[in-house]
Image: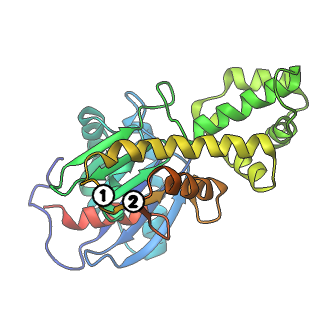
Amino acid sequence: MTPPPDGPPDRPTALLLGVDTGGTHTTVIVGHRDLTVLARAEGPGAAMRPEGAEHSAVVIAETARRAAGLAGVELPADRLVVGAAGAGRAREQRALEAALMARGVARQARAMSDGEIALAAAFGAGDRGGVAFARDPQGQVHRSGGFGWQLGDEGGGYWLGRRALQAASRAYDGRGEGSTLLSRLLAALGLTDFDTLIGWATLATPAQVAALAPHVLNAAREGEAVAQRTVDDAARELVALVRVLARHFPAGKPLAVATGGGLLRPTSPLLAAFRAALAADLPRAILASGPVDAPLGALRLAAELS
């Protein structure tokens, strides 16, 4: 973290920004130290890639300026905290902080992984599509999963999108059960047949594959059998992340769990499947009634910066 020249302001009206960004979506909250939210703006994804701090900063800065406009305030903010997918290492964090301050978004910036701000918004433990974080009774933070689409992302957006493409191909050539996923994907992507889907998949970025996940969830909601099994498998993968972190807490005592991310909204079939799998596999877990507001967690951390 790079401190501002004169130190952080202590006045209650200090202007703060809380940012949550992933592969497909960015949210910026403008607020004050008492966590009063002045405005919220949405933008495209700005997940960190190797040497990609400048690209991420451009998207975040654009979204932050729209949020500031809605709030009727001017940037730079006094302090900013951003939770970014792909920013789990110090080198990427420092690069993103410097890029945001250079663009005049904030006088002081701190970057961290998106899971960490979700944890700050929760109450003791957080799970976020493909990655989980927990804070044990001693205050130490532990992590499970979240190593990117190449190494895992089990239960996350890319994983669901990849499974949908696999199911479509297996249904097409008869290796798997018949499924409507192929026709759904073709319609969603504006393609005509399986051959054009092959061409699309060959060139698709991880974010484009992850963007197929909502179509899997919609199919599962409508009773599509293959999609339902895929969602159930994703839920079990997410529960496995929680089970690993449960080892850091006293056995037999209740374990607070909260969820965050667009795939785990209140009406999502993935959340319903996760709730059922968690109850069966980890009965002592208590799932929060609502999802974590990760950008608000970032705003809270910005208020605590010194």
151 shown above or below 212: above
**Amino acid marked by disc 1:** Gly
223 shown above or below 66: above
Tell me residue 210's x, y (percent): 61, 39
Picture disc at residue 118: none
Secondary structure category for the residue under label 2: loop
In the rendered view, does 204 fall on the left or right side of 16?
right
At 15% from the left and 55% from the top, the residue drawn is 138
Judge the density around disc 1: few (<14), some (14-19), many (≥20) Cα neighbours within 10 Å.
Answer: few
Residue 196 vs residue 285, the one in the foreground: 285
At 38% from the left and 49% from the top, the residue drawn is 115
Work out which quarter of the rendered image holds the C terminus and state it: bottom left
Residue 103 vs residue 146, the one in the foreground: 146
At 45% from the left and 50% from the top, the residue drawn is 128
In the rendered view, does 210 fall on the left or right side of 223?
left
In the rendered view, does 42 fall on the left or right side of 38?
right
In contact (CB < 8 Å): disc 1 and disc 2: yes
How has the structure been colored for display? Answer: rainbow
Picture disc at residue 284: 2
Asked whether residue 303 is in view, the answer is yes
Tell me residue 146's x, y (percent): 42, 37
**Residue 32 sits in quarter:** bottom left
Tell me residue 65's x, y (percent): 44, 61
What is the C-alpha distance between the residues marked 1 and 2?
Answer: 7 Å
Residue receiving disc 1: 252
